[in-house]
């Protein structure tokens, strides 16, 4: 694929992510605040614990849809279904129905990763590795502008329009994403399905690929571990905000819009400037190592003085690097592998792995709460321990990344020759 076509695909998929993330910023904080108003902040681990089941079932549907209809129609169907489900939740919320707030919370956790990972699957199928090292940062930057716009839009509109109306905006934001995504596939075609040379991928989710590819196993372990960090930091932050804004739903939603809008705006500096520079001059291993080292410092400060400010900064930094440097460095690893790795195993890692990390940790928290353990006071210590494990896992991941990528490319080439 010529460079101009590579850049066109990258730009158009980035535009899809722009609108998707803009809508997500409206629904992210709104759904959390609405759920807390209905059931309280202490119930967040309960709904998060259900997440792995929802994600697993959703990925099974995704995998079967991909097998039957291909990536283009799968993206169209999943985006359209997400918009319609969110729209239905909005109308039910207007009736003051409490259970639908839990459904909305779970939907927003699943749909965003499923859609974003499909955009990246197509990008990784269309870009060469050298091109990706240069443009992955700007791709996340364009998407990040959408996130910033959505966050600031929530901050400005939540109080005058009401938190419930933010859910409607999230649904409408997916319409341009549907149109641009379909146009991209129409112009540039679907990626070639490269066969697995030695064995089948292992069902619609490609689970057997993990047995033969240790890069995938380590990636899944790192994603899972990092999302435990995200979960406990988020829970600590939300509990502090519930105390700070007790009884002020719209005001809290506006503050969270300001927080995530500021986050997305700040991330743009990383995505457009820092990430391309670091990815060009540093080894992939060093790029991966930098992130947990930064988190160790921020979380340690929060442990010493746990306030809305210090915990907010630790959570802010985690999200900032997760959206920028971690994303850009991680996506490069998928490029040399087969279609099933990019479209099936990747979704297991970056959809199920992301949400399972939060869900499993939340289930453990719920269990400990039920047996009388005051786990909420240990959220930050859990985060610090998981960051340390993340740092350890980077070394086996990156030790053989280049060798594994070359081997995968050679296997794909042999499979195509056969």
Image: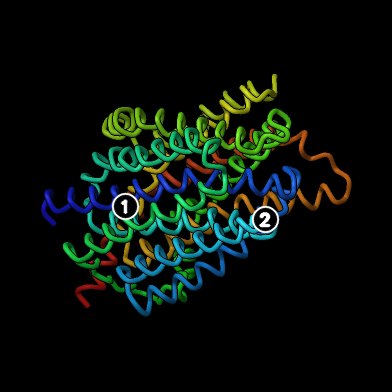
Q: Are marks 1 and 2 in contact (CB under 8 Å)?
A: no
Q: Residue at x 70, y 45 (%)?
A: 37
Q: CA distance from mark 1 to mark 2?
A: 32 Å
- For disc 2, the marked residue is 96
- For disc 1, the marked residue is 16
Instruction: Please state which of residues 168 and 182 is positioned toward the viewer in this rendering.
Output: 168
Which badge, 1 or 2, comes first in the chain's sequence? 1
Q: Quadrant where the N terminus lies?
A: bottom left
Is residue 46 depicted above or below 160 in this figure? Answer: below
Q: Position of residue 221 (x, y in %)?
A: 54, 51
Number of numbered labels in the structure image: 2
Disc 2 element = loop
Q: Residue at x 74, y 49 (%)?
A: 39
Q: Residues within 10 Å of mark 1 (few under 14, many from 20)?
A: many
Q: Nearer the viewer, mark 1 or mark 2?
A: 2
Instruction: Please state which of residues 85 and 263 is positioned toward the viewer in this rendering.
Output: 85
């Amino acid at each position: 694929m010529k460079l101009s076509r590579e850049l066109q695909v990258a730009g158009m998929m980035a535009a899809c992510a722009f609108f998707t993330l803009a809508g997500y910023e409206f629904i992210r904080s709104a759904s959390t605040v609405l759920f807390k108003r209905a059931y309280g902040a202490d119930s967040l681990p309960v709904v998060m614990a259900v997440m792995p089941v929802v994600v697993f079932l959703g990925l099974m549907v995704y995998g079967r849809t991909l097998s039957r209809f291909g990536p283009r129609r799968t993206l169209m169907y999943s985006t359209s279904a997400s918009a319609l489900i969110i729209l239905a939740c909005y109308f039910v919320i207007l009736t003051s129905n409490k259970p639908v707030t839990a459904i909305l919370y779970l939907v927003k956790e699943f749909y965003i990763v499923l859609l974003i990972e499909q955009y990246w699957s197509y990008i990784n199928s269309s870009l060469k590795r050298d091109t990706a090292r240069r443009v992955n940062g700007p791709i996340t930057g364009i998407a990040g502008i959408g996130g910033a716009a959505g966050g600031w839009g929530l901050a400005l509109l939540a109080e005058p329009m009401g938190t419930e109306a933010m859910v409607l905006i999230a649904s409408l934001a997916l319409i341009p994403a549907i149109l641009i995504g379909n146009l991209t596939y129409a112009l540039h075609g679907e990626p070639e399905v490269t066969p697995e040379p030695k064995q089948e991928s292992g069902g619609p989710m490609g689970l057997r690929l993990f047995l033969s590819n240790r890069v995938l196993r380590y990636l899944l372990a790192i994603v899972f571990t990092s999302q435990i960090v995200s979960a406990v930091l988020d829970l600590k932050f939300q509990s502090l905000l519930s105390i700070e804004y007790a009884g002020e739903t719209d005001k809290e939603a506006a503050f969270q819009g300001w927080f995530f809008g500021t986050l997305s705006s700040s991330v743009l500096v990383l995505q457009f400037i820092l990430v391309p520079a670091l990815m060009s001059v540093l080894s992939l291993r060093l790029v991966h190592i930098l992130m947990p080292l930064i988190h160790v410092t921020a979380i340690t400060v929060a442990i010493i003085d746990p306030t809305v400010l210090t915990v907010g900064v630790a959570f802010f930094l985690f999200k900032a690097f997760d959206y920028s440097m971690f994303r850009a460095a991680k996506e490069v690893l998928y490029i040399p592998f087969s279609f099933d790795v990019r479209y099936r195993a990747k979704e297991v890692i970056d959809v199920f792995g992301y949400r399972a990390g939060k869900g499993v940790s939340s289930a453990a928290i719920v269990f400990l709460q039920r047996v009388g353990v005051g786990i909420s006071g240990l959220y930050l210590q859990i985060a610090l321990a998981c960051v340390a494990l993340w740092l350890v896992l980077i070394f086996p991941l990156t030790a053989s990344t280049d060798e594994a990528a070359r081997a995968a490319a050679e296997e794909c080439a042999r499979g195509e020759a056969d």
